[in-house]
Amino acid sequence: MKTLESNCSGSEYPTANCGGILTNPRGDIYKKFGDSYSSDSCVWYISVANNNRIHLSFNQFLKRNSQHVRCPSVLVYDGTPRGSVLLGSLCETETRSFISSSNSISIVYSSYNGGQDLEFSASYDSVFSNNNNVTVSCHSNYMDVRVALGYLNSLGYSESEIFLNDPQCRPTTVSGWLKFHIPYQQCLTVKQVEN
């Protein structure tokens, strides 16, 4: 298994000598006692292939001083830390395993005393998810994305809350589906050609 611990500079996350973006289908994350960072927080953002979900398990979670009033926090989000559902706070719950609803998950570590009172290790694995609630079909000049309305409702969203920022690319509702028709070079898409 591969571990990635890199600087987060250039991303939307805090600049710190910890955390990183992990894109491998499986991997490990570590934080040791005595690790000190230049920032009060670190973010590990895990993003795997589409149509996969992430199984994240904390193998070790130790507090050096269990009497410590303010525990450094480890938060797990179902996606990015901004605007995603909080799956758990490890200082406040016994839950140590999490499953994402999509292909991304985030771990946010925040310290209160230089990050020296907590040690943890976690491993993740991606699992193919045959999700019939979301479909993407790509064509030469556009792509179509369909999301089942029942699925949106089960996640706590309504069809009026889901849209692209481009006002010309609003979805339509068709037979129980929210459908996006997204022309390339419009709807804030950028065409990239590789190889």
Image: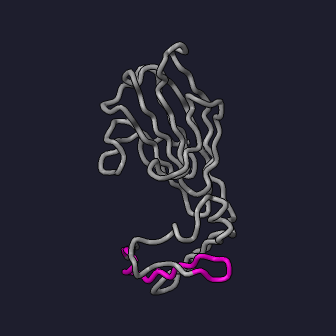
Q: Is residue 121 inside the magenta stretch?
A: no
Q: Is residue 179 inside the magenta stretch?
A: yes
State the residue in front, 86 or 105.
86
Residue at (46%, 21%) from the top-left corner?
33
State the residue in front, 63 or 165.
165
State the residue in front, 163 or 187.
163
Please report the bounds of the magenta region as a residue range: 173-190
> The C terminus is located in which quarter?
bottom left
- The coloring applied to the image is one colour
Please tell me whether residue 43 is drawn above or below residue 54 in the rendered image: above
Which residue in the rendered view is the most extreme toward the bottom?
141
State the residue in front, 124 or 131.
131
Which quadrant of the view contains residue 38?
Answer: top left
Please tell me whether residue 34 is drawn above or below residue 5 in the rendered image: above
- 84 left or right of 110? right
Question: Horizontal and vertical percent for residue 99?
Answer: 64, 48
